[in-house]
Amino acid sequence: MSPLKHSIFFRIYAGLVALVALVAVLAYFIVQLINYQRAQDYREVMADGVAHVISQVVARQPTQQSQQDWLMDVSRILELPLDIVKEDKLDLSRSERNRLQADHAIVRYNAEAAVGDVYVQVDGMPKSFLHIRVDKLSEVQIKMIPILILEDLVYYPGNEEQRLKELQPYFPYPIAFRNLSDLKLDMDQISRLRTDKTQTILLYRDSATMQGTTISAVSAYTNTPNKVLVLGPVPVFNWMPFRLVAGVTLFSLFMLSLGVYFLLRPLQHKIGKVRLALNQVRKGNLDTRVAVQGSDEIANLSLSFNMMTEHIQRLIEAQRELTRAVSHELRTPVARIRFGMEMLAETDDYDSRIKQTEMIDKDIEALNSLIDEIMTYAKLEQGTPSLHFEPVSIRNVLEQVIKETEVIKGDKKITSMLPAEETQVIAEYRYLHRVVQNFVVNALRHSDGTVHISGGIRNNQAYVCVEDDGAGIPEKDREKVFEAFARLDDSRTRASGDKGGYGLGLSIVSRIAYWFGGKVQVDDSPSLGGARFTMLWPISQNQAQRIDKKKHHE
């Protein structure tokens, strides 16, 4: 899970999922909030006209008893409780009070009980309000609306049209007299309206337009046979109208776009840093590094970029140093060969010619040795060695090196402490042999008489160690000895009378240790008093595989 957790793509996908979920929840609550207000506004505007007409009729009743009787009759017909309540029983808010004073109805809706309480001011009763409790809606109640309006019109004989105009502001839908022939009614509906003057017909219209589903109420008008009172079309409340859907969709898209921008902005910022660093490297500024932030793919890219530029910088510096050092090292044997050739040309003495030929041969051998060292160092430094890790017996490697150095050790003594035959480690045999060989040759060159070789496994790490009884290496110069063509002008070099070596042997060891995933170190020999060189590296196959992956990565 850890690599997936740090994957930038996983984080982006997870962020997108979380963003979509968050926007969906936000959109849901926005729709709920908007619909809550829309529903409240719808209830109030729909209750306005009916409540106003009822309050007007109540106000016209001559006595309080007649008011109570009329309210009871209407309550029975509407199947809704109606009564008069005093103001002191209502805890009115400022907005409710302002609405009542403007002669509009207020609606208090209880969502849990699904009950709405409608209140409206009654003319002539300043401290009293008409109260209608709406606990259900049915066709009976809708059909009663035009009947109540017609009852109100009774008080305005001859001025019915003018009265409808006065009532219209209280209704959010049209109310008007229309000719029966202008309505698209079937014969049965027309017959019912003409024969029963108390009849009210409901017309439903289901439309895909912005208006949506509507209801119209048509009621017969007793004074004129061919005229009817038409209410509507009354829009049915639509919980998801087109405008709301479009608005919430656009808002969600905007929030998603904004969220995606903020999700990708850090990625863009990091990539921009890498791009700027690449431009700097292209201009030749190899000291450029990218700040590594986090552990995602961009962080790995930044780390790889830093390692690459560091490696390139090291290669260029090594190439420059190698060119300078090689030109210096080649000058001496080439000059000796040229001098020997001149001596051969000037002498006819057979013994002298043989001697000069042998000297030239030694110089050519020295050149071969130098070129071999340079090629090995260059191959290791450039990061292109072909390493084949396999189980290797340290004892076999040490024994082979001891046997090979018998011819060059002279009167010096080589002691050893070899591990068991079955002690095996993961290594590249050829390069491990080169490490031990370079250690031993270097120790023989600087020792006074004794060299000690050891190897094995210690603290879950493989190691090879070579000690000598020479002058040792000062602590301040111990890192310098692993640099290419490094020569120490100290007591160790002077004491050994060293004329050989090119300063590449230990730098080759350092690079081999690097590719083995280990390290090389030098300190004082506790037993012989001289220098002790040690290389340590991992012994397990898993570690070797990680080293191999690291090699290919670089």
Image: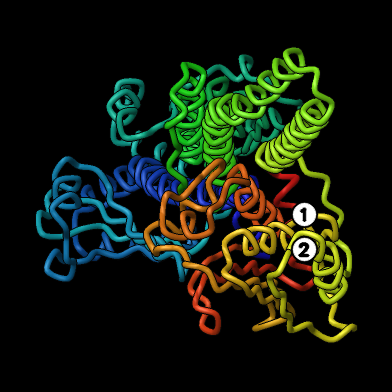
**Element under label 1?**
helix
Q: Image point 26% across, 61% down: which residue?
A: 66
Q: Which amino acid does label 1 sit on?
A: Asp
Q: Image point 84% across, 86% down: which residue?
A: 420
Query: Which one is nearer the viewer's eye here, 252 or 393?
Result: 393
Q: Is residue 228 visible?
A: yes
Please give the label number shown on residue 544.
2
Binning the other alpha carbons within 10 Å of mark 1 as few (below 14), some (14 to 19) or many (20 upward) gives: some
Quarter holding residue 381: top right
Report which residue position mark 1 lands on.
548
Quadrant where the image shows the C terminus: top right
Quarter holding residue 328: top right
Please give the label number shown on residue 455.
none
Q: How far apart are marks 2 and 1 (CA)?
A: 6 Å
Q: Is residue 216 visible?
A: no
Q: What residue type is labelled 2?
A: Ala
Query: Which one is nearer the viewer's eye here, 152 or 383?
Result: 383
Quadrant where the image shows the N terminus: bottom right
> Looking at the picture, how far across and down is residue 291, in whole percent?
43, 42
Q: Are marks 2 and 1 in contact (CB under 8 Å)?
A: yes
The answer to whether residue 477 is above or below residue 203 is: below
